[in-house]
């Protein structure tokens, strides 16, 4: 019985890995899109929270290092000007960042942004870790995000969890965290918004 269970778990892990969708933008596109934000080095935990039951629907990380990147594990947001490599999105300008948060905040979900300033070295290590992580299977966003964070100095106390709201609660207990919440009353059809964003002005950034 124990052996059967072990084979089942191994098979499930292999199945989940196969479900991860790998993307790899060319070097030229990534270099062209690179955006440096003038703010201090920081890591922002992004959590989409269900307005009906308070449960978490998604976890992601905004990393402000030598360039600003978005780790959006198994995420569904994209933009024609934003290159992606295995759930790491490049060229997160202020316009793209607003597009991303607008996409997730709607009448059924609000977005919680928890930002912690870090040293340039920690920010670069976070960027390196997400770039090396690989594509993430669906329903593993918080598990992947918490796994990255726990490997960084100052974040070791965070739990490894599958639940975005539990990761959010633990992140809030870290010293120096600043929290912002985004509420919008847009309808649930964020696919229509995503399509519209492709034709909106992207600005100079």
Image (tube, rainbow, N blue to C red):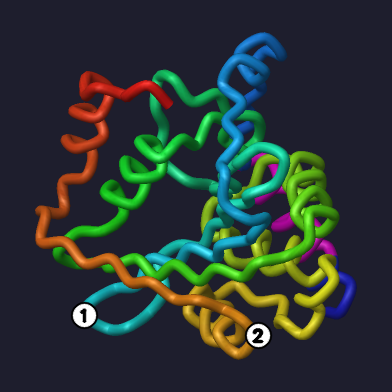
- Boundaries of the magenta span: 7-19
Q: Is residue 148 visible?
A: yes
Q: Which residue in the protein does label 1 denote?
A: 52
Q: Secondary structure at mark 2?
A: loop
* Residue at point 44%, 20% (across, down): 81
Q: CA distance from mark 1 to mark 2?
A: 27 Å
Q: Position of residue 141 (x, y in %)?
A: 57, 59
* Magenta: main secondary structure: helix
Place residue 111 in its image quadrant.
bottom left
Q: Residues within 10 Å of mark 1 (few under 14, many from 20)?
A: few
Q: Position of residue 177 (x, y in %)?
A: 57, 79
Q: Which mark is residue 174?
A: 2
- Residue sitting at x 50%, y 71%: 114
Q: Residues within 10 Å of mark 2 (few under 14, many from 20)?
A: some
Picture residue at 23% right of the left edge, 76% below the top = 51
Q: Is residue 8 visible?
A: no
* Quadrant of the image containing the N terminus: bottom right
User: Based on the displayed image, in which of its 4 quarters is residue 20 positioned?
Assistant: top right
Label 1: element kind: loop
Comparing 93 with 3, the one in front is 93
Question: Is residue 13 inside the magenta stretch?
Answer: yes
Position of the C terminus, as image quadrant, is: top left
Of tags 1 and 2, the one toward the viewer is 2
């Amino acid at each position: 019985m124990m052996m059967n269970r072990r084979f089942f778990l191994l098979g499930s892990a292999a199945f989940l890995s196969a479900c991860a969708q790998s993307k790899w933008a060319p070097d030229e596109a990534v270099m062209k899109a690179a955006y440096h934000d003038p703010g201090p080095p920081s890591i922002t935990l992004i959590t989409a929270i269900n307005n009906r039951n308070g449960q978490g629907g998604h976890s992601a990380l905004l990393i402000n290092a030598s360039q600003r990147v978005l780790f959006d594990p198994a995420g569904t947001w994209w933009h024609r000007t934003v290159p992606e490599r295995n759930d790491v999105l490049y060229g997160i300008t202020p316009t793209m960042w607003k597009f991303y948060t607008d996409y997730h905040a709607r009448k059924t979900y609000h977005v919680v942004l928890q930002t912690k300033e870090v040293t340039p070295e920690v920010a670069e290590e976070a960027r390196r870790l997400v770039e090396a992580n690989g594509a993430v299977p669906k329903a593993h966003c918080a598990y992947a995000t918490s796994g990255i964070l726990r490997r960084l100095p100052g974040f070791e106390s965070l739990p490894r969890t599958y639940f975005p709201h539990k990761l959010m609660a633990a992140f809030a207990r870290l010293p120096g965290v600043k929290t912002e919440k985004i509420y919008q009353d847009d309808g649930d059809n964020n696919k229509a918004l995503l399509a519209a964003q492709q034709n909106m002005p992207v600005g100079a950034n």
